[in-house]
Image (tube, rainbow, N blue to C red):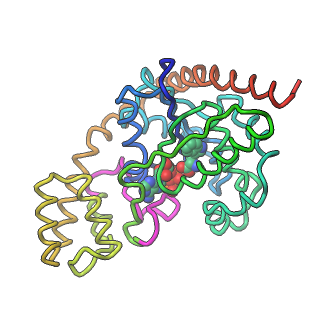
Amino acid sequence: MSKGKPAILTGMQPSGELHVGNFLGALKNFVELQNSGTYDCYFFVADLHALTGDSKSAGLADKTRGVVMDYVAAGLDPDKSTIFVQSQVTGHTELAWIFNTLTPMGELERMTQFKDKAGRQQKNINVGLFDYPVLQASDILLYHPKLIPVGQDQVQHVELTRSIARWFNKKYGEYFTEPQVLLTNVPKVMSLIDPTKKMSKSLGSAHYIGINEEPAMILKKLKKAVSDSGDGQSAGGTNLLLLLEEFAHPAAVEYFFKQKKDKKIKFGELKEQLADAMGVYFEEFREKRKALSQDKKYIDQVVRGGAARAQKVAGKTMEEVRERVGLL
Ligand code: ADP
Ligand code: TRP
């Protein structure tokens, strides 16, 4: 919020509960960036993007509130960051339209997330799904951010955003600055039961560990996770070791990496220790999340305040854009 600091901006879709992939690839980093005090931070819920998906629209508002609760429970602070809901700020869709007129179809046809999702929802390949990255570019450029903290899978969309900024500048004069992606040290956590694929909500519940899940459930899911004969070299083994490094006590990490050296990892034991460690790690989150879920009013107040702040910035950008483009 403080002027003069470089801005960072990122968003998440309200498509269900957050998992440890979202946490390690994105949310954990958001909190650290906010607390560094270095940036003017914008965190939003991409509810308009969620409309392009296959899930029923019933419950969207609650899912949107749910992401805000996740943000706040994880440590995002409405006094330090602008936390808002995409659809409550005008400008996102308006700028997207202008960007539509600058973006070649061929660029969108190349997007791997589009190809992926179109494959998964063949009966619902809507124009919004195709145009999704243009709306994302608009989400980003409206706020002139320097950095976009996201997981690996979003890199291509940020690249396209950079191109759109260039196309705009070329046609209408230098205006947008090209933002850069900021990856975490864990940009890609893999699925528990199909570790060749990225951990994702859309694969189904057995593939991920939700950060709000109870310890007993964490253990149950980890027990079914794919591992290997003990050398820790397979995709599943590597993924479990990565989670161990992120969540377990350094002594436990050392213990299992010693086993790895001898190619004798006892994955049964590792999974139990990992489940314990994760249960403890997210205990505070679970408690805060539970309290927030009973305080809908507070959440609505957070997003109202966030929308007002975001609207000021977005409104100014739109005024400047309209003038440059020649809209009366
Ligand atoms: P999902 O694929 O589960 O629907 P989203 O697309 O909503 O997740 O992603 C929200 C954020 O979390 C994005 O910044 C994304 O890059 C990051 N993310 C998602 N899945 C992973 C993963 N498996 N590993 C690391 N980061 C991830
Ligand atoms: N596409 C992102 C995802 O699936 C969500 C998103 C929408 C986003 N707009 C954004 C992320 C702008 C960063 C910046 O995770």
- Of residue 229 and residue 233, the one placed in the foreground of this image is 233
Which residue sits at x=74%, y=44%?
Answer: 167
- Of residue 10 and residue 269, the one placed in the foreground of this image is 10
Q: Could one spot residue 290 in this view of the protein? A: no
Q: Quadrant of residue 109?
A: bottom right
| Most distant residue in the right direction | 328
Can you give x and y, in whole percent of width and height, for residue 230 in the image? 20, 78
- Above or below, comparing residue 73 to residue 186 in the picture: above
Can you give x and y, in whole percent of width and height, for residue 267 in the image? 20, 72
Q: How many marks?
A: 0
Q: Quadrant of residue 34?
A: top left
Which residue sits at x=46%, y=26%?
Answer: 81
Magenta highlight range: 196-217
User: Does residue 13 show up magenta in the picture?
Assistant: no
- Above or below, comparing residue 155 to residue 267 in the picture: above
- Of residue 58 and residue 136, the one placed in the foreground of this image is 136
Q: Left of 17 or right of it: where is 231?
A: left
Q: Quadrant of the C terminus?
A: top right
Q: Left of 118 or right of it: where is 269?
A: left
Which residue sits at x=23%, y=81%?
Answer: 229
User: Does residue 205 show up magenta in the picture?
Assistant: yes
Q: Left of 295 or right of it: where is 52?
A: right
Q: Could one spot residue 5 in this view of the protein? A: yes
Q: Left of 32 or right of it: where is 244?
A: left
Q: Quadrant of residue 234?
A: bottom left
